[in-house]
Amino acid sequence: MELEKKQAAGGPAGKPGKPGKAAAGQLLEERFVYKDDDQIDKAFDWKQFTRLFGYMKPYARQMLPIVSVLMILGTVTKLTVPFLTSMAIDKAIAPKEGSPSLTLLYTLTASVIVLYLIQWIAGVYRIKYTNVIGQRVIYDLRSDLFRHIQKLSFNFFDKRPAGSVLVRVTNDINSLQDLFTNGVVNLMIDCVQLVGIMVILLLINWKLGLAVMITVPIMFLVSTKLRQKIRIAWQDVRMKNSRINSHLNESIQGIRVTQAYTQEQENMQYFDAMNMDSRKSWNKASAMNQGFGPIIEVTGGIGTMILFWFGAYLIQSGDLTVGYLVAFSTYVSNFWDPINRLGQMYNQLLVAMASSERIFEYLDEQPAVQDKPDAKPLPKIQGDIRFKNVVFEYEKGRAALKGISLDVKAGQSIALVGHTGSGKSTIINLIGRFYDIKSGELTIDGQDVREVQLQSLREQIGIVLQDTFIFSGTIRDNIRFGRLDATDREVEEVAKAVDAHEFIMKLPRGYDTEVEERGSALSMGQRQLLSFARALLADPRILILDEATASIDTETEIKIQDALKILLQGRTSFIVAHRLSTIRHADKIVVLDHGEIKEEGNHAELTERDGIYNGLIEAQFRFL
């Protein structure tokens, strides 16, 4: 789901962008616009329904026989009880001929108790097995979704907030649990029970059976009118919840900025408006759900009136006994219960379908960058890289690179410099094939990157970013992320090489110190040193440093200059940086401007020219 952020309208005079509480709802619509709102109008997709329940097939084959036996056993025992009750009335309590029989009454009573016991045991084990199946299905579905998301390209995440992705893997999957753990089996039980009751009613007295069931078509006709509205209402609930999750994730990630600009109150107003919107949507959908109950009750009431009116007539005419009328009444009562549950089940199914639409939307999303059918593994590379007339667009009609041509020899270090938006990060993203070029050619050791397998390409590329991501876990685990099979000794050696060993040993448990997500307990410089150690451990043939020293203080930068020499030795490297100390020793400096290469050469050659590079250097010195 793509979230477009629009600039909020101005508030009171002198406070632009700060809305009052009354305006929060209006600003909510202005600030958050969902492009896939039209999905609400889609019809019920039976193909998708079949696809969703296809996840049950592997386990249905294993457990379906057991569940079926337990289901049939429970249903048969339940349907037998009213028949025994009628026998107790007509044969033991008030027989037409002879005197009442206590022996028969006790026997029938004991039989009913045994049947209820069997029904209870069958229900316990049925629930146990169906829960096992349901949880396995949820596990498989969640695993498939997460695995697929891991394969999606950068452009997928460029268009979606993290909260929207998160809600698919958590809330939307969780909403399917009830359906798979007990909903499906309950649906089967209710259907079997309905068929069984209708057969029994017609066998007892077909005239009375038809008279009672005449209300069923009326009930279905009325309830059908609600189905479309209910489905749309639950889809709306899911979309509103996704909106809340997206905003919540954004708020948590940007809490420092929010507090720094004292925007807590405004942020709360936006959240309150979304929360209220979600509550109203839920209430609306829930109210529609409750519409099924009165329909069933009214229809059941009419059926009961017909039962006793026509039943009394049949008793007087001798076509029906009192015992059978009591049994008939019990069966009719049991008839409306599953119909009511089926109505609720349909609502539950609508909720599940609303979630499954969103889940399959992601599962059907194809990576923009993927291996060709005939792609071959990339052998160990030397590191020769060539851009030949490369054109790339993030958006159609807006070229980020305009005919870039660049030759890089194995082992060379290339510094990319230029103003913001000049194309530096785009070039390094194309080397790792995180995006595909529109036209031209990009080769590594003479092989087009689009013709080789992605994994074999990226395994030989190391990237150190400005915003280093530290995972929850130990310091050792974060360094080992560069190569998972590395030994503890190898981890410590690379840490020493980048001068990270000293600060690591000062931590409470050294390399086994637990760090929180994003490494909030570490300084920016310490996180960068860990990222250097991670890259060195991976031992890539091509190394990319994207503003990797931008957040490091001067003292720390001095420490890692020697480490950089070790890190860059024998590797083809691309360095995106503005600091002169980081780029001046590069073999070649490439100056970019608006997606084009304007200058090339080493530091000495470029400073002799009165060009863009020289202007950047002079500007840097002016602000020192």
Image: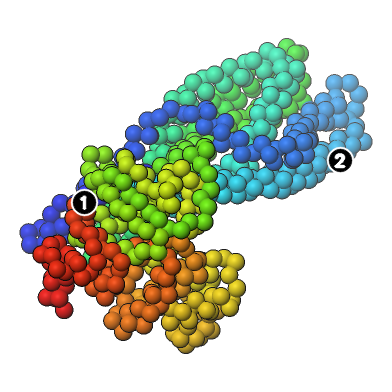
Q: Position of residue 17 (x, y in %)?
A: 16, 57
Q: Is residue 257 visible?
A: no
Mark 2 vs mark 1, CA separation in Å: 91 Å
* Residue plotted at (84% across, 41% down): 114
Asked if residue 41 can be seen in this view, the reply is yes
Percent from the top left, x then y, of residue 168? 46, 48
- The residue labelled by disc 2 is 110
Depth check, front residue: 354 or 511: 511
Q: Residue at x 86, y 35 (%)?
A: 108
Question: In the image, which is nearer the foreground, mark 2 or mark 1?
Answer: 1
Instruction: Give the x, y percent position of residue 186.
Output: 65, 37
Q: Which residue is mark 1?
A: 596
Q: Please say which color scheme the image uses.
A: rainbow
Q: Secondary structure at mark 2?
A: helix
Q: State yes or no: discs 2 and 1 in contact (Cβ < 8 Å).
A: no
Q: Residues within 10 Å of mark 2 (few under 14, many from 20)?
A: few
- Give 287 or 11, whichever is nearer the viewer: 11
Vertical side of 321 occupied by 50: above or below:
below
